[in-house]
């Protein structure tokens, strides 16, 4: 199921209870709205054209200012048929302990970047991820919120994960 939503821009305030679960598909997730609001501010201030690392540093500052709990460069282990691989994934940000945030500074994202976020979600067992592209002229034009849910039939098998929603062009 593919869901595309263009919600109106509203003022963002950090939520106080970051550990409360949300339904698997939710058109307005306050956590992701707060993160996207912080990213849009960074984009308004810096514009496009910088390297990804510049946006990472600026977003880290803005997330902290907004009171969004954040960990940077989080390593995610990868298992293959029950065995831990020596290599790991490294997520740009993990916010609220369960929202994966991946940054890019490209003129346009492709399926490769989306697949990268999906793999982060699978490896970490997370349900929600954001792909934030600061290379676009308008920040919302390249913001994707990806929601992942696991089929109940085989909870331990990562091949049974399905994208249940991709919400694109948030804000603008």
Image (tube, grey):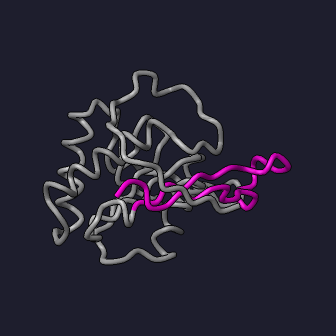
In the rendered structure, the answer to whether residue 151 lies left or right of residue 82 reads right
Q: In which quadrant of the rendered view does residue 78 lie?
A: bottom right
Q: Is residue 23 above or below residue 153?
A: above
In the rendered structure, the answer to whether residue 1 lies left or right of residue 132 reads right
Q: Nearer the viewer, residue 164 or 119?
A: 164
Exactly how many numbered labels are in the figure?
A: 0
In the rendered structure, the answer to whether residue 65 lies left or right of residue 81 reads left
Q: Nearer the viewer, residue 141 or 9?
A: 9
* Residue at image coords 65%, 42%: 24
Residue 77: x %, y % from top left: 52, 52
* 47 part of magenta stretch: no
Q: Nearer the viewer, residue 31 or 149?
A: 31
Q: Quadrant of the C terminus?
A: bottom left
Q: Is residue 118 above or below residue 93?
A: below
Q: In which quadrant of the rendered view does residue 51 lie?
A: bottom left
Residue 145: x %, y % from top left: 49, 54
Residue 129: x %, y % from top left: 49, 52
Residue 111: x %, y % from top left: 51, 75
Query: Which residues, given as a range, are shown in magenta?
Result: 143-172
Q: Nearer the viewer, residue 120 or 14?
A: 14
* 145 part of magenta stretch: yes
In the rendered structure, the answer to whether residue 87 lies left or right of residue 46 reads right
Q: Looking at the image, which residue sits at the far top?
A: 16
* Residue at image coords 47%, 44%: 99
* Residue at image coords 35%, 33%: 69
Q: Looking at the image, which residue sits at the far right?
A: 153
* Residue at image coords 44%, 37%: 31
Q: Quadrant of the N terminus?
A: bottom right
């Amino acid at each position: 199921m593919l869901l595309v939503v263009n919600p109106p821009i509203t003022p963002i305030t950090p939520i106080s209870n970051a550990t409360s679960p949300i339904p698997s598909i939710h058109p307005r997730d306050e956590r992701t709205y707060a993160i996207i609001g912080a990213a849009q501010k960074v984009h308004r201030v810096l514009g496009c054209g910088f390297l990804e690392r510049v946006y990472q540093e600026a977003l880290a500052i803005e997330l902290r200012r907004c009171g969004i709990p954040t960990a940077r460069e989080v390593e995610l282990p990868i298992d293959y048929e029950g065995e831990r691989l020596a290599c790991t994934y490294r997520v740009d940000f993990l916010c609220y302990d369960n929202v994966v945030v991946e940054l890019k500074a490209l003129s346009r994202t492709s399926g490769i970047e989306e697949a990268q976020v999906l793999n982060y979600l699978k490896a970490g067992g997370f349900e929600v991820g954001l792909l934030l592209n600061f290379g676009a002229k308008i920040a919302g034009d390249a913001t994707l919120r990806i929601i992942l849910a696991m089929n109940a039939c085989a909870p331990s098998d990562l091949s049974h994960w399905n994208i249940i929603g991709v919400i694109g062009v948030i804000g603008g």
